[in-house]
């Protein structure tokens, strides 16, 4: 593999997953992160679906040579994303009905999250490869955020991490906080994580 | 017709217990940058109270007349509900743009205040999420429109609480990294904890 391509991949992954992470740095697409992270399995499925749709959308929209800021381009992007979400809903309903029921309205709602991440993803230039890499990296960053929040909530609410039927218990459930499963828990956990990340990123800055 | 007690239960459920911002986290994009001022929240509420019932009513009609039908024996004769996501997005975009033009013609002074929110609301999960929730839960067209109104009011109410509380904390000794969105999320967490007491 060409060294410059490897460097481009590394750079895109670093920028999309960490430096410009959609959830913890750019503060976008928070609704699924707050709602879905009760269950680690659902969070992983949603994150993977979002990443895949971002990659496919960027591939297709890169081939359309039009003014990127135009209304038609935005409507076309939104419609394409909605169509891909519909296809993924149909596949998930057949393949994983329990995950589909658990995701509820947040799978169709991910249309808006994907659209926002698509437009806010950082990219160095407008080449096809850069576009696809940056959107894919942003999707992976979103998946990473979902996993981190799910694990923390799962540990705090039940003392264990449950993943595809396997449970890893860290401490007794008697020491856990059931309220971490509720809306209060998700808002508090996500707020604290974003606060700590923001403090770390802006450390040393005088404001 | 809806009975009075059912009507009151619907109001309390939509505004407090199942508040879309606190329980379903819809419309949280609005607070990501800055919380709107109380005046801006009223303008946003005006946009929502017109748009959300219109969109949910339209979504209800499309769902029950076009996508899904049953005969007298209760057998499903048409099931195209997998198109609901795509159609909901199209409905939201059309409704938001239509309402903006309507307000421009009927209330021109309000339009220049409202137009800032049209693009924002299109990219907000609130309207789309409300349509999906209401289509799944409403039994009649009237119920879907009323739910749309009360969901908007509940959203505006919580946003107003958030604004007023954040204003009180301007001079509070909050860590620099926690100012802005992290503090707003923690305030919403506390409001969610208080409101959860209403559900018993």
Image (spheres, helix red, strand yellow):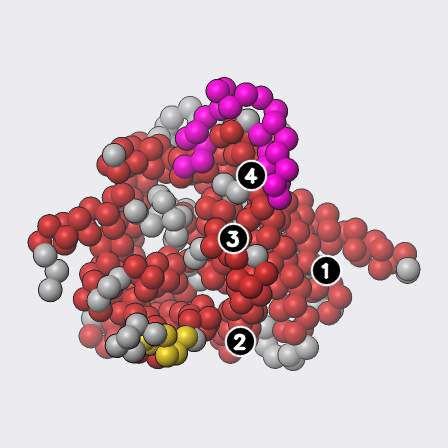
Magenta stretch, residue numbers: A160-182
Do we see residue B158 in this rendering?
Answer: yes
A152 relative position to B156: left or right = right
Residue sitting at x 14%, y 54%: B7
Q: Magenta segment: does it hold A50?
A: no
Residue sitting at x 35%, y 47%: B21
Question: Do marks 1 and 4 both belong to one polypeptide chain?
Answer: yes
- Label 1 – label 4 distance at C-alpha: 24 Å
Which residue is identified by label 2?
A76
Which residue is identified by label 4?
A149
Q: Earlier in the sequence, mark 1 or mark 2?
A: 2
Question: Do marks 1 and 3 both belong to one polypeptide chain?
Answer: yes
Question: Do marks 1 and 2 both belong to one polypeptide chain?
Answer: yes
A93 relative position to A6: left or right = left
Which residue is identified by label 1?
A133
Which residue is identified by label 3?
A98
* Position above or below: A44 against A162: below
Task: Check the residue under mark 1 and report the chain it is in.
Answer: A
Q: Position of residue A189 (x, y in %)?
A: 49, 34
Q: Earlier in the sequence, mark 1 or mark 3?
A: 3
- Label 1 – label 3 distance at C-alpha: 31 Å
* Position above or below: B71 against A38: below
Label 1 environment density (alpha carbons within 10 Å; few <14, some 14–19, many ≥20):
many
């Amino acid at each position: 593999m060409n060294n410059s391509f490897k460097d481009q991949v590394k750079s895109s992954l670093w920028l999309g997953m960490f430096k410009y992470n959609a959830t913890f740095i750019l503060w976008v697409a928070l609704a699924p992160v707050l709602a879905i992270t009760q269950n680690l399995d659902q969070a992983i499925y949603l994150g993977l679906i979002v990443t895949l749709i971002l990659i496919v959308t960027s591939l297709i929209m890169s081939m359309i040579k039009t003014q990127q800021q135009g209304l038609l381009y935005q409507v076309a992007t939104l419609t394409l994303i909605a169509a891909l979400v519909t296809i993924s809903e149909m596949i998930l309903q057949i393949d994983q009905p329990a995950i589909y029921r658990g995701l509820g309205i947040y799978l169709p709602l991910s249309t808006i999250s994907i659209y926002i991440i698509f437009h806010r993803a950082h990219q160095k230039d407008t080449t096809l490869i850069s576009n696809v890499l940056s959107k894919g990296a942003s999707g992976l960053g979103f998946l990473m955020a979902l996993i981190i929040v799910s694990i923390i909530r799962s540990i705090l609410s039940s003392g264990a991490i449950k993943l595809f039927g396997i449970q890893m218990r860290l401490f007794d459930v008697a020491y856990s906080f059931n309220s971490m499963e509720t809306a209060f828990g998700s808002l508090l956990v996500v707020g604290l994580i974003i606060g700590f990340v923001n403090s770390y990123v802006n450390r040393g800055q005088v404001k | 017709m809806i009975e009075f007690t059912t009507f009151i239960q619907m109001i309390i459920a939509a505004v407090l217990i199942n508040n879309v911002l606190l329980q379903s986290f819809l419309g949280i994009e609005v607070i990501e940058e800055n919380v709107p001022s109380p005046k801006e929240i009223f303008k946003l509420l005006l946009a929502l109270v017109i748009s959300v019932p219109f969109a949910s009513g339209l979504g209800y009609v499309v769902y029950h007349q076009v996508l899904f039908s049953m005969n007298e024996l209760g057998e499903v004769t048409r099931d195209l509900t997998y198109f609901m996501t795509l159609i909901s997005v199209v409905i939201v975009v059309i409704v938001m743009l239509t309402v903006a033009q309507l307000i421009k013609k009927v209330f021109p002074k309000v339009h220049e205040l409202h137009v800032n929110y049209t693009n924002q609301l299109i990219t907000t999960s609130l309207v789309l999420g409300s349509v999906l929730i209401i289509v799944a839960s409403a039994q009649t067209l009237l119920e879907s429109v009323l739910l749309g109104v009360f969901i908007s009011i509940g959203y505006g109410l919580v946003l107003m609480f958030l604004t007023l509380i954040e204003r009180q904390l301007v001079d509070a000794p909050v860590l620099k990294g926690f100012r802005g969105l992290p503090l707003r999320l923690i305030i919403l967490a506390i409001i969610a904890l208080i409101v959860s007491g209403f559900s018993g």
